[in-house]
């Protein structure tokens, strides 16, 4: 367990984990090799597929419409989401005792919550775009102009960043002074809350509140 004592006078008896041990998906060696190639294949397909979408939309001027701009944003968010999780997951399958630093864990949590929030709001934005195209076809190009498209994307990013900062900021306030083993394959909110020595009621409430606001 990698822990160090804090020198803060109010937390003299507390300690904080400097790194976490990630258990991964399985501890069976015979399954780790199969899972490694399975997830590597999924990651490469997802990464290359999204990159093809990004390149096609950027270099094809006929695709510079709101629908494809939102699709471009979704592809970029998917790349960030998978890249923040799967490479480290692959590492846990190659190294028996895979660890992640405290900073690395918080970074992974930030980018995962950011990309997840951005995806949820982007789906709503894309649904709104299709609603305008179907219900107001004659006014669609006037309503969904470049300024409206940029404004909607700005709102999506603002909501995603706010969502991520709230969750990550609340996790950063917690103290991890007990076991540092994450019973999961990446740094997500529930397994981190299970390791905290601090009260986590506020974190749990905010998870339910933000899920309700974004997904409902």
Image: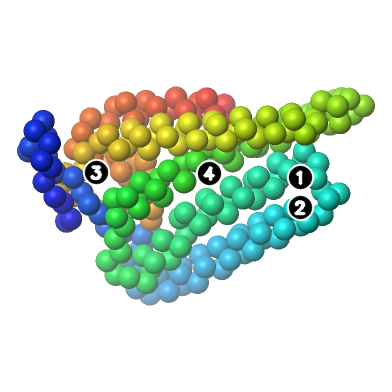
Residue on which the image places disc 3: 195
Say above or below: 118 vs 135.
Answer: below
Any part of residue 61 in sight: yes
Picture layout, residue 187 above or below residue 197: below
Kindly identify the residue that appears in the image at 33 percent across and 33 percent down: 170
Residue 183 appears at what percent x and percent y? 31, 52
CA distance separating discs 4 and 1: 18 Å
Numbered disc 4: secondary structure: helix
Task: Point out the tag, 4 or 3, that comes first from the N-terminus.
Answer: 4
Q: Quadrant of residue 43?
A: bottom right
Q: Residue at x 59, y 50 (%)?
A: 78
The answer to whether residue 74 is left or right of residue 129 is: left
Check residue 49 in the rendering and tell me which mark sits there, or answer none. none
**Residue in the image at 43% along x and 28% along y:** 208
Q: What numbered label is drawn on residue 68?
A: 1
Task: Please tell me whether mark 2 or mark 4 is closer to you in this view.
Answer: 2
The one nearer the camera, 26 or 64, is 64
Q: Earlier in the sequence, mark 2 or mark 4?
A: 2
Q: Is residue 184 visible?
A: no
Q: Locate residue 181 relative to residue 115 in the image: left or right.
A: left
Q: Left or right: 173 with respect to 117? A: left
Image depth: mark 3 or mark 1 in front: 1
- Quadrant in which the C terminus is drawn: top right
């Amino acid at each position: 367990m990698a822990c160090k004592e804090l020198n803060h006078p109010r937390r003299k008896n507390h300690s904080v984990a400097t790194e976490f041990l990630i258990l991964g998906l399985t501890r069976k060696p015979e399954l780790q090799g199969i899972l490694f190639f399975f997830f590597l294949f999924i990651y490469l397909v997802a990464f290359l597929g999204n990159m093809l979408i990004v390149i096609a939309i950027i270099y094809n001027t006929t695709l510079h419409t709101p629908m494809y701009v939102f699709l471009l944003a979704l592809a970029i968010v998917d790349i960030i989401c998978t890249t923040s999780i799967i490479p480290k997951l692959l590492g846990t399958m190659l190294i028996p005792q895979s660890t992640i630093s405290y900073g690395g864990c918080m970074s992974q949590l930030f980018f995962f919550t950011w990309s997840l929030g951005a995806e949820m709001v982007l789906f709503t934005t894309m649904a709104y775009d299709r609603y305008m195209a179907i219900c107001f076809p004659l006014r669609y190009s006037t309503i969904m102009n470049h300024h409206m498209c940029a404004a909607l994307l700005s709102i999506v990013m603002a909501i995603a960043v706010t969502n991520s900062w709230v969750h990550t900021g609340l996790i950063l306030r917690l103290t991890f002074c007990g076991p540092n083993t994450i019973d999961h394959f990446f740094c997500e909110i529930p397994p981190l809350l299970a390791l905290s020595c601090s009260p986590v009621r506020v974190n749990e409430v905010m998870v339910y509140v933000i899920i309700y606001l974004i997904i409902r």
